[in-house]
Image (tube, rainbow, N blue to C red):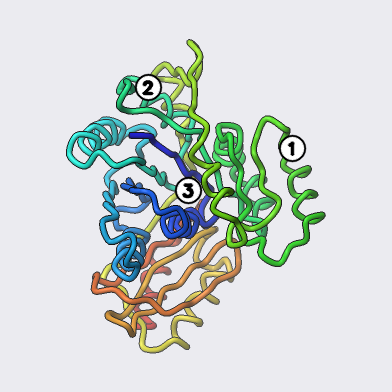
């Protein structure tokens, strides 16, 4: 079993890439998905996608929502990886950490359980073409760890960018020739492009990704907070738009990310808010509706009143 870590800051598009990867490669996957919040939003999204795609109906999805797999949840994470290898033994285990994870620490946590049957591929990180400057400026600790740990850097939300514009982003990020950086959006990739993600195995040097406990804990100190609302409901799509516009005012805290879904069946709505912009799409799920808000500061009482006002 080969482990592929797919990191990326909040809202960069990790789940979208994993969906495309599963659809376009035809490989046998299992997925470990680690949410920053206690409730999962991306898990139901992956399950809905799996149920609709005939060629990936055996996609196994495991959610770890109780603690970050970098630190407090690392023992559960190690145990889950070993269990997946023994019980399912997929060709590949895709690990999707939360947007505020440190991939370098995840690699450190994986080292003790590596052997000939469990190996690690070159880590991937997803960079949001629209929001990377804001993310790096405000959350450099997370952003740079994800970028520096990756061997493959993929630009998301770049469908309408020219090659020259993508090259300028590469220069802005300071990406050297030691990293693979595709110059087109993955929606245009060939099968050969996708296969490249699975070719390079990570070889650990003696001192690579080694942490003593206090250094790891210090590195993982986070200013990020989250608030989950479950069950979550809105009277109409207009009320959902109002809710997201209000979140964007700054009156409810310094909010960088919000996501969730409301309704059920084929009438459900899914929303994604990242760094001041948002998107609302249709969604088919039978899961209980939930919303998650993430930011440096959260005015919880005001947020609760806001969510109550649109029910």
Residue found at x 35% / y 47%: 34
Q: Position of residue 232 (x, y in %)?
A: 31, 74
Q: Between marks 1 and 2, how big is the CA–CA gap?
A: 28 Å
Residue found at x 45% / y 72%: 271
Q: Between marks 3 and 2, how big is the CA–CA gap?
A: 22 Å
Q: Which circle's residue, 1 or 3, is located before the other in the chain?
A: 3
Using the image as rendered, state which of residue 20 and residue 254 is in the foreground. 20
The numbered mark at residue 111 is 2
Residue found at x 17% / y 39%: 87
Q: From the image, state whether disc 3 or disc 2 is nearer to you.
A: 2
Q: Which residue is mark 1?
A: 174
Using the image as rendered, state which of residue 279 and residue 208 is in the foreground. 208
* Location of the N terminus (image quadrant): top left
Q: Between marks 1 and 3, how big is the CA–CA gap?
A: 21 Å
Q: Residue 274 appears in which quarter of the rendering? A: bottom right
Left or right of 203 on screen, residue 160:
right
Q: Residues within 10 Å of mark 2 (few under 14, many from 20)?
A: some
Q: From the image, state whether disc 1 or disc 3 is nearer to you.
A: 1
Q: Residue 128 appears in which quarter of the rendering? A: bottom right
Q: Which circle's residue, 1 or 2, is located before the other in the chain?
A: 2
The numbered mark at residue 99 is 3
In the displayed structure, 101 sits above or below 230; it is above
Q: Residues within 10 Å of mark 1 (few under 14, many from 20)?
A: few
Q: Position of residue 105 (x, y in %)?
A: 44, 29
Question: Mark 1 and 2 residues: CB-CB less than 8 Å, in contact?
Answer: no
Residue found at x 60% / y 66%: 276
Q: Which circle's residue, 3 or 2, is located before the other in the chain?
A: 3
């Amino acid at each position: 079993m080969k482990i592929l870590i797919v990191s990326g800051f909040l809202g960069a598009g990790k789940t979208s890439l994993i969906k495309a990867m599963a659809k376009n490669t035809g490989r046998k996957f299992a997925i470990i998905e680690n949410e920053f919040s206690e409730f999962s939003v991306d898990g139901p999204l992956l399950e809905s996608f799996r149920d609709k795609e005939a060629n990936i109906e055996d996609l196994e999805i495991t959610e770890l929502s109780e603690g970050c797999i970098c630190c407090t949840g690392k023992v559960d994470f190690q145990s889950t990886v070993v269990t997946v290898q023994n019980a399912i033994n997929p060709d590949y285990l895709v690990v999707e950490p939360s947007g505020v994870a440190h991939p370098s620490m995840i690699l450190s946590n994986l080292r003790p359980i590596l052997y000939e049957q469990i190996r690690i591929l070159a880590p991937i990180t997803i960079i949001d073409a629209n929001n990377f400057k804001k993310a790096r400026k405000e959350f450099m600790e997370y952003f740079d760890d994800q970028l520096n740990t990756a061997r493959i850097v993929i630009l998301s939300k770049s469908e309408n960018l020219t090659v020259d514009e993508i090259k300028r982003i590469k220069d802005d990020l300071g990406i050297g020739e030691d990293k693979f950086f595709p110059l087109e959006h993955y929606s245009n990739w060939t099968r050969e492009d996708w296969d490249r993600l699975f070719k390079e195995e990570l070889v650990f040097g003696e001192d690579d990704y080694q942490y003593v406990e206090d250094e790891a804990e210090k590195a993982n100190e986070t200013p990020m907070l989250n608030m989950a609302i479950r069950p979550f409901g809105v009277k109409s799509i207009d009320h959902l738009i109002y809710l997201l516009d209000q979140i964007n005012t700054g009156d409810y805290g310094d909010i960088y990310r919000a996501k969730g879904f409301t309704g059920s069946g084929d009438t459900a709505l899914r929303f994604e808010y990242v760094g001041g912009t948002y998107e609302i799409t249709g969604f088919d799920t039978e899961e209980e509706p939930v919303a998650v808000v993430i930011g440096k500061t959260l005015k919880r009482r005001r947020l609760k009143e806001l969510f109550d006002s649109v029910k």
